[in-house]
Image (cartoon, rainbow, N blue to C red):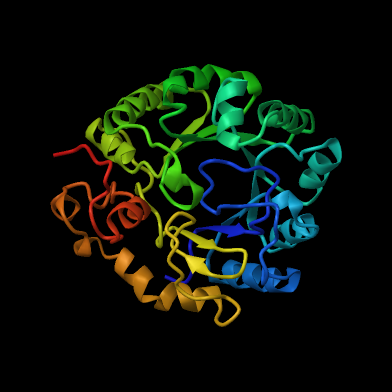
């Protein structure tokens, strides 16, 4: 395995918001040693040659990097599907036009509430909701396809049923829900209860079946077991960390995913393809026979796999059982 099919690159840890759940614990400061433009080009070159098909430019807030569109355009020239994950607050008509010009195929905008009070509390800044909605309206006006990303925790799980109609009204092409992983600032955010998560996934399944837009659950691998049990076509494994999905930090550390913050090597020292093929951590992650606890004997371990990042953060071992799993 030379490269992940999907690669998320954290362009910068700098951000203009102060979100309660931020896995990167991002602040307005720019950490020293972030990858240069040329180092980023080398990363994209190697990823493209090694089999990566899609790149997510994330952060922090990627729009805070001056070279973000230069990087996106370069990735597009290599044949990579370039996407971007933003909080929406910095999107202007000029930014939206540049996104189109450099070949960004989709933008994800984070909305963690259908009301101002919930979203603003989640994002740690008053006015974040209105800024996000303004950014979304600009993306729509300029014909930039966008999806909504929502992190589910105790403070917003009650709004789950209200999201689908709200998101559809915005004109989004997809809704991706993320179950909270207690890493970064997310360690201090109260998670929804196991019952609330289970009920939420039951609701999400109905949305998934009935919706006219794409619906995907992330850091919620149990959803893919639910699909399999109901006889639906399961197109992907629940947890892709270290297999179909990879992550590169702003300073070049390769990780299985953004939430499983175990450095497997640094692209300043060795190409991504070598790290991806040789890292003992990544090799172990791919071996479902090494899973522990009830995950090891589960008939759905190759469909679900459990969230390896949540196991690591809560239990200290990324091969142990996913702590939110409710299955016997």
Q: Is residue 30 above or below residue 108?
A: below
Q: Is residue 10 left or right of residue 209?
A: right
Could one spot residue 148 in this view of the protein? no
Residue occupying the point 63% across, 51% down: 60
Q: Nearer the viewer, residue 126 or 312?
A: 126
- Residue 231 drawn at (x, y percent): 25, 32
Q: Is residue 130 above or below residue 294?
A: above
Q: Nearer the viewer, residue 287 or 126?
A: 126
The quadrant in which residue 68 appears is: bottom right
Q: Is residue 120 left or right of residue 241?
A: right
Q: Is residue 69 above or below residue 192?
A: below
Could one spot residue 134 in this view of the protein? yes
Residue occupying the point 48% across, 62% down: 4
For the N terminus, give its image quadrant: bottom left
- Residue 305 drawn at (x, y percent): 28, 51
Q: Nearer the viewer, residue 46 or 133?
A: 133
Residue occupying the point 49% across, 17% down: 162
Q: Is residue 277 left or right of residue 272?
A: left
């Amino acid at each position: 395995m030379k490269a992940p099919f999907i690669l998320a690159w954290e362009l910068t840890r700098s951000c203009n918001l102060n979100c309660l759940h931020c896995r990167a614990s991002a602040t307005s400061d720019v950490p020293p040693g972030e990858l240069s433009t040329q180092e980023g080009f080398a990363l994209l070159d190697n990823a493209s040659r090694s089999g990566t098909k899609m790149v997510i430019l994330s952060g922090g807030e990627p729009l805070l990097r001056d070279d973000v569109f230069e990087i996106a355009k370069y990735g597009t020239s290599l044949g990579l599907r370039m996407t971007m994950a933003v909080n929406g607050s910095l999107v202007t008509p000029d930014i939206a036009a540049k996104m189109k010009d450099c070949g960004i195929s989709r933008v994800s905008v984070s909305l963690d509430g259908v009301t101002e009070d919930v979203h603003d509390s989640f994002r740690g800044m008053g006015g974040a909701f209105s800024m996000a909605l303004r950014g979304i309206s600009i993306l729509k006006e300029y014909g930039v396809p966008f999806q909504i990303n929502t992190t589910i925790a105790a403070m917003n799980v009650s709004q789950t049923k209200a999201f689908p109609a709200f998101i559809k009204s915005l004109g989004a092409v997809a809704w991706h829900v993320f179950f909270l992983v207690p890493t970064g600032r997310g360690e201090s955010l109260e998670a929804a209860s196991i019952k609330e998560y289970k009920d939420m996934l039951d609701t999400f399944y109905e949305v998934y079946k009935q919706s006219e837009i794409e619906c995907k659950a992330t850091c919620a691998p149990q959803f893919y077991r639910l699909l399999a049990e109901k006889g639906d076509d399961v197109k992907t494994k629940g947890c892709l960390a270290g297999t179909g999905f990879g992550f590169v930090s702003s300073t070049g550390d390769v990780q299985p995913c953004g939430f499983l913050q175990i450095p497997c090597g640094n692209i300043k020292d060795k190409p991504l393809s070598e790290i991806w093929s040789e890292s003992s951590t990544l090799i172990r992650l791919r071996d479902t026979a090494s899973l522990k606890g009830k995950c090891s004997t589960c008939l759905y371990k190759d469909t679900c796999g459990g969230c390896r990042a949540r196991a690591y953060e809560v239990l200290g071992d990324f091969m142990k059982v996913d702590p939110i799993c409710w299955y016997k």
